[in-house]
Image (spheres, rainbow, N blue to C red):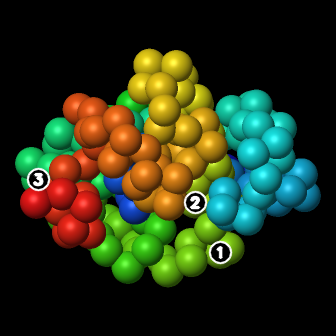
Amino acid sequence: MTKSFEIGIDEAGRGCIFGPVFSAAVVLSKENGVILRNLGLDDSKKLSPNKRSILTPYIFAFSEDWGIGQSSANEIDKFGIRYATELSMIRAIDKLKHCPIKILVDGPLSIRSWKGIQKNIVKGEQKFASIAAASVLAKVKRDALMNRFETKYKGYFLSKNKGYGTKEHFLSIQTNGLTKMHRISFLKKLNVIR
């Protein structure tokens, strides 16, 4: 009997005001999906940083393949968040060893430039282990980048806020100004800058 595989796609950092948006694609058999669920795999937002860190090597071990892509703050400002997110997803898919025929995408919005078959699933992390695994990988990789940026961009509390628009982050912009990693388009919409 041949194993059936699902290819789940999810993103992290879509709503941030700082840094790139990350996406991950994970190729997972149903059997290995059950194993990962039994190890505690869930939507990355429902897991603690420690639990995500513990799960990551298991996701690598039990996945048939995986890929991670990102789209920069500059691309987000230039093309808009939806297109930039789609671009990061395509880049994640491009890292897979084989081009998939069908993908499962978290959320209601399709990847408009994807020519293959795709199925959009709202709250897909709850329904497909491959999407939950992709959500964890994207979040872990993006958070690791924010932790590294903590020393490069001092005073923005990035290891704490991970680039999201917290009150502390907005106050630090008033004090320290903007960096090239801030999403100007987002800050304009929020009336933080003109």
Q: Which mark is residue 185?
A: none
Q: Position of residue 106 (x, y in %)?
A: 47, 68
* Tag 1 and tag 2, C-beta contact below 8 Å: yes
Q: Residue at x 82, y 42 (%)?
A: 50
The residue beneath circle 2 is: 131
- Per the image, label 2 sits on a secondary structure element best described as helix
Per the model, the C-alpha gap separating discs 3 and 2 is 25 Å
Q: Residue at x 35, y 53 (%)?
A: 17
Residue 10 visible, this orientation? no
| Sequence-first disc among 3 and 1 | 3
| Sequence-first disc among 3 and 2 | 3
The residue beneath circle 3 is: 79
In the image, residue 6 above or below residue 153: below
User: Closer to the camera, 106 or 49?
Assistant: 49
The residue beneath circle 1 is: 127
Instruction: Look at label 1 and name its amino acid.
Output: Lys
Per the model, the C-alpha gap separating discs 1 and 2 is 8 Å
